[in-house]
Image (cartoon, rainbow, N blue to C red):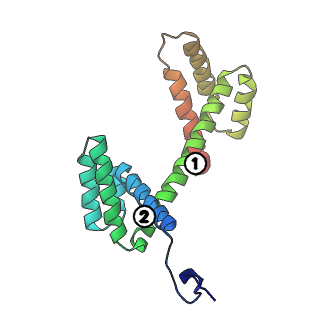
Amino acid sequence: MNRNYTDDPEHDYGPTRTQQRRDALAVLELAGQLVELPPAKLAKLELPDDVRDEIANVRRIPSHIARKRQLAFLAKLMRRHDSSAFDAVRAALGENRDRQRQETAAMHRLEALRERLLGEDGDDATSELIESHPGIDRQHLRALIRQARVEKAAPNKPPRAYRELFQLLKSLQDDAAD
């Protein structure tokens, strides 16, 4: 019987080259995300000191090719550490991404509501908004809507009421969330 060395069920051959490559690319992507994080958020993460220093080095490099090479070195440095050292970092970045998506979706909903208030069915939308938020200053809301419509019709006019209307809707949403 001619047996290949891979036919031995008792032997652990470790990860394949393809899996090793996938893992290395995942670490490189994580390194890129860490470099792009604002310094305040990066300071909150628990990172090894050498990785933190190398992130600072990568940020100082303006040249694209040199930055890419230094980013690859950062990923290599990260691979030297145990992968569990970055589990908390991955979790924090995932939570940030989810939170960012939720905030963006909420802003889009507010913008859509503002456009609906200023559109053709604005009276219906205003009535619905007043019903859902009975404590709202109705006169102020209607005045803002009128001013925003005038600003929208006159392109030279700054959109002050348009922005103020958005801020009012945002404060109503924040009050409803609390």
Question: Mark 2 belongs to which amino acid?
Answer: Val
Look at the picture and state if 165 lies above or below 178. above
Query: Can I make out residue 43 in this image?
Result: no
Q: Residues within 10 Å of mark 1 (few under 14, many from 20)?
A: few
Q: Which image quadrant: the N terminus?
A: bottom right
Instruction: Give the residue at mark 1.
Output: 102
Which one is nearer the viewer's eye here, 157 or 21?
21
Residue displayed at 39% across by 72% down: 85
> Which image quarter: residue 3?
bottom right
Which one is nearer the viewer's eye here, 60 or 148?
60
Q: Is residue 68 left or right of residue 145?
A: left
Looking at marks 2 and 1 on the same chain, the residue that comes earlier in the sequence is marked by 2
Image disc number at residue 147: none
Q: Residues within 10 Å of mark 2 (few under 14, many from 20)?
A: some
Q: Nearer the viewer, mark 2 or mark 1?
A: 2
Residue displayed at 48% across by 21% down: 160
Question: Mark 1 belongs to which amino acid?
Answer: Gln
Instruction: Give the residue at mark 2.
Output: 89
- The percent coordinates of residue 121 (x first, y second) are 74, 23
Q: Is residue 121 left or right of residue 29?
A: right
Look at the picture and state if 65 lies above or below 1. above
- The percent coordinates of residue 91 (x first, y second) are 48, 64
Q: Is the C-beta separation of discs 2 and 1 under 8 Å? A: no
- The percent coordinates of residue 44 (x first, y second) are 36, 61
> Which image quarter: residue 52?
bottom left
Look at the picture and state if 78 lies above or below 14. above
Look at the picture and state if 138 lies above or below 87. above
SS class of the residue under badge 2? helix
